[in-house]
Amino acid sequence: MNQINHRKNHKLVLMSLGGSVGKTLIAVHGLYPLLPDATILCVDQVNTTAADFGIENCEQHAGDEFNKMYRSLMSMDGNVIVDVGGSKECKEFLEGMLAVDGSDQITKFIIPSRPNSKDQGCAIDTIERLLMDGVDRSKIKVVFTDVKKNVADEFKQLIDGMAENRLYPDLNLMIQHSPLFGEMIELKLLITDIIADTTDYAAKAANRSSDDHIDYVGMHLRQRMAIKTAWPNLQYVFSKLLEEA
């Protein structure tokens, strides 16, 4: 498994004024495996967070606790991943950051978006709010999630909105649609655990009379999706993003 070895520490914020766009997916399955020493600050007290996947190096925060998080960002020498919840938490986080001009401690703002018009609109709103608050354009990165076929076609609204704000995304920062991601969220599975599991579930599933036959089939399919497509996709996207200056 590749791990990023950088001299500088990453202080990464995942945010969007829209909900359910893939922030926790990216934090847990995209960034954390490449930065396993990272502390995850979960700015959400309602929805699924990294702690639900058994990741112990987490801190739970409310959206209006930016001052507390800022102290953590300043005092931690290692990598930090901040997973900001939905609209309410994002607005509170932005208000707190603006109040102390706190974007200086953040190396990248990662904004995920799904293809539907509402989520693309929320991503544009988030970008414009960050720019209005004085965040440097070079710190803002968009990750296109749930891509079915073609990023340029599926995300035209977002790409055009970024261009109006003089931002030009890397269309290779895209996560392809996979049913595996929904299953991992539902079952609270880490993709790294699926990859590390060397059990031959295809052989176990061959016994169709077994009471566990259906479960073995499911485990076999999750292994194949993880190894063949999902994990290489995630590694490529987030290795590329983290290696950018």
Image: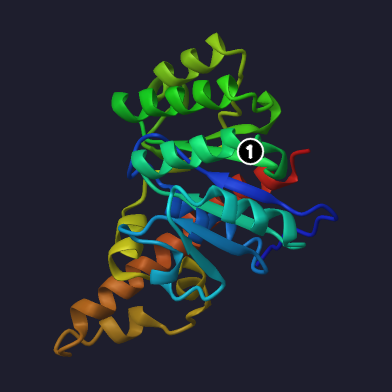
Residue at the far top in the pictured view:
164
Indicate the colouring scheme.
rainbow
* The N terminus: image quadrant: bottom right
* Front residue of this view, candidates 13 and 3: 13
225 horizontally vs 13: left or right? left
Residue at image location 70% in from the left, 42% down from the top: 107
Image position, residue 185 (x, y; %): 33, 61
Percent x, y of residue 229: 47, 54
What amino acid type should be assigned to the residue bearing mark 1? Answer: Val
Q: Is residue 98 left or right of residue 123?
A: right
Does any portion of residue 89 appear in the rendered image? yes
Q: Mark 1 highlights which residue?
A: 100
Element marked by disc 1: loop
> Across the whole image, how many numbered discs are drawn on residues?
1
Mark 1 Cα-neighbour bin, 10 Å: few <14, some 14–19, many ≥20 = few
Q: Give the answer, above or below, for where 70 lies relative to 34.
A: above
Q: Kindly indicate the quadrant of the structure image that contains residue 181.
A: bottom left
The residue drawn where x is 49% and y is 19% is 159
x, y percent for residue 121: 37, 23
Please name whichever residue, 32 or 173, is drawn nearer the observer in this view of the structure: 32
Residue 45 locus on image (x, y percent): 35, 59
In the depicted structure, whether residue 146 falls above or below residue 29: above
